[in-house]
């Protein structure tokens, strides 16, 4: 099952404050890979992440409309931590979700969009990887699995 650990939750939610913004990758509408730093990345649920996209006309939203697959990368070299999160992103325009994602974004991110013209994007996590090993995975049939150390399947 996909269940972010307390360590993951804390690291993700404090990434920008720790000067370790999360790298987000996606394939744009023209099929080109794109990478950006997202200081607003946050845990949204036990198996979801969220980002606040300040520019609603930017590349992220047009990309996920065509291909919702996204990868996020957290790395803290001082703590020797690194995780990849693979998932499916969707725009969420509901007022409750917009408010939650905006309010939970770091102050600097909120200050960069004081009129709240941005958009909430929710990422349903399908796989968590550390050091090349799958830690958690959601399977095509909707079931999930978590692996004990050394109990990793080859994908």
Image: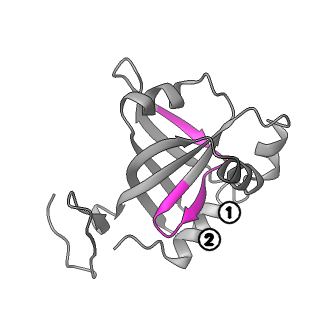
Specify start and end residues of the magenta stretch as a single range.
35-49
Q: Nearer the viewer, residue 95 or 47?
A: 95
Q: Residue 52: horizontal and vertical position, in percent?
A: 65, 43
Quadrant position of the N terminus in the picture: bottom left
Disc sitting over residue 89 in the figure: none
Residue ID at (42%, 35%): 26
Q: Secondary structure at mark 2?
A: helix
Magenta portion: prevailing SS class: strand
Contact? badges 2 and 1 (CB < 8 Å) = yes
Q: Quadrant of residue 114?
A: top right
Image quarter of residue 120: top right
**Residue at position x 62%, y 54% from top?**
20
Q: Check the image and report above or below for 93 versus 33.
A: below
Q: Where residue 94 sits: x, y (%)? A: 64, 46
Residue 146 appears left or right of 18: left
Residue at label 2?
10
Instruction: State the residue position of label 1.
Output: 14
Instruction: Measuring from the top left, give residue 48's x and y in whole percent.
Output: 49, 60
Residue 37 falls inside the magenta stretch: yes
Task: Choose between 136 and 154: the one closer to the eye.
Answer: 136
Say whether residue 123 is left or right of residue 88.
right
Question: Dot 1, how many residues are within 10 Å of its Cα: few (below 14), some (14-19), or many (20+)?
Answer: some
Q: Position of residue 155 (x, y in %)?
A: 16, 57
Label 1 element class: loop
Q: Nearer the viewer, residue 76 or 35?
A: 35
Note whether 69 is above or below 154 in the view shown. above
Classify residue 136 as left or right of residue 90: left
**Which residue appears at 70% of the width and 47% of the height?**
95
Question: Residue placed at 64% from the left, 58% from the top?
Answer: 15
């Amino acid at each position: 099952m996909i269940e972010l650990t307390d360590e993951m939750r804390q690291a993700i939610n404090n990434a920008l404050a720790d000067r370790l913004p999360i790298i987000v990758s996606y394939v744009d509408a023209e099929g080109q890979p794109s990478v950006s730093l997202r200081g607003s990345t946050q845990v949204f649920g036990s198996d979801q992440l969220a980002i606040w996209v300040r520019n609603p006309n930017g590349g992220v939203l047009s990309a996920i409309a065509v291909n919702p697959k996204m990868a996020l990368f957290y790395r803290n070299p001082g703590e020797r931590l690194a995780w990849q999160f693979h998932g499916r992103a969707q725009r969420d325009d509901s007022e409750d979700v917009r408010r939650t994602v905006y309010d939970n974004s770091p102050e600097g991110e909120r200050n960069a969009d004081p009129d709240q013209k941005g958009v909430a994007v929710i990422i349903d996590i399908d796989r968590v990887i550390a050091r090349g090993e799958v830690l958690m995975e959601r399977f095509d049939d909707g079931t999930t699995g978590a692996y004990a150390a050394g109990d990793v399947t080859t994908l």
